Amino acid sequence: MFGISAPRMAVRAAIPWYWRWLGLIALALIILLLSRAAYDFGKEFAGFDQSEADREVQRLGASNARLEQELALVRGQIAQGERQLQMEHATYADLVKQMKALSEENATLKEDLAFFQTLMPSGGKEDGMAINRFLVQNDALSGEYRYRLLLTQTGKRSKDFQGRLQFSVNLQQDNKKVVMTLPAEDDKENNGFNLNFRFYQRIEGAFRVAPNAVVKSMQVRVFENGSSEPKLTQTANAS
């Protein structure tokens, strides 16, 4: 179309298509580089750095591993110390038991020595009597009180000793002091209380008291046949 109403026409130099694509790619790379730079600038401005964070995580991990090793070492030392302490306590308990056993054995040996000394003949001494190992104990299982003693004849021992025993039990009952006699007054036969020996005689027995009574002590009297006065007396506290 020609004339005044005809459209305008522009004439430009022709650009190959590959240059256009290269330009677009270069523009995209520039945009990516600018975005990356802006991202890094934003991280630095905000105080966050990925590499620094990774290094901090590694440092904390190494520190945690070192602390766990130290904790395991301390736990091992504590366990070893506890085992050593238990061994020392066990050793101490064994020593206490041994000392107690030795003390009891020593006391028994002293009693045996005293006993055998009384059995040794002694010239010039008249016949005598001795009470050894007089004990009164509460047997909680049976509810009885048990007693035992050892009578020995000292001196020349020219004849057998014949006689009888009598016990007086001191009780605490209903806030009152009560005395119980063994054997009972109506026991004429004195079963278990008669004496007949040349060297020694062991005496053992048991008795019961009222449930509300407590035995405090017990006294033994040794009578010789034909005599109303005791030849020997001794008192033992109940245990």
Image (spheres, grey):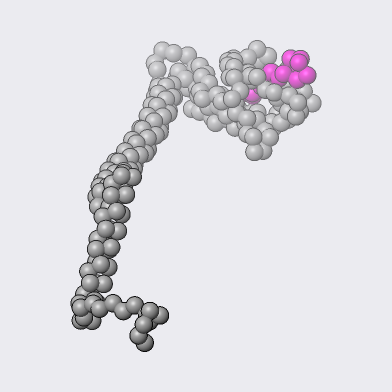
Which quadrant holds residue 85?
Answer: top left
> In the image, what residue occupies the spot 72% across and 18% down?
172
Q: Position of residue 142 (x, y in %)?
A: 67, 38
Instruction: Name the quarter where the C terminus is drawn.
Output: top right
Q: Residue furthest front?
A: 3
Q: Nearer the viewer, residue 67 or 89?
A: 67
Left of 154 or right of it: where is 2? left
Q: Nearer the viewer, residue 140 or 43?
A: 43
Which quadrant holds residue 221?
Answer: top right
Is residue 79 in view?
yes
Q: Position of residue 81 (x, y in %)?
A: 31, 38
Is residue 72 in view?
no
Magenta region's main secondary structure?
Answer: strand
In the picture shown, does residue 194 fall above or below 26? Answer: above
Left of 239 or right of it: where is 228? right
In the picture shown, does residue 112 fall above or below 63? Answer: above
Q: Residue furthest bottom?
A: 1
> In the image, what residue occupies the spot 38% across and 79% down?
4
Q: Position of residue 98 (x, y in %)?
A: 37, 33
Q: Position of residue 32 (x, y in %)?
A: 27, 63
Which quadrant holds residue 67?
Answer: top left
In the picture shown, does residue 136 fall above or below 227? Answer: below
Magenta-span inclusion, residue 12: no
* Number of numbered markers: 0
> In the image, what residue occupies the spot 27% across and 68% down?
28
Magenta-span inclusion, residue 175: yes
Q: Nearer the viewer, residue 215 or 129?
A: 215
Range of residues picked out in magenta = 163-178
Q: Nearer the viewer, residue 90 or 75?
A: 75
> In the image, what residue occupies the spot 59% across and 17% down?
235
Instruction: Name the quarter where the N terminus is drawn.
Output: bottom left
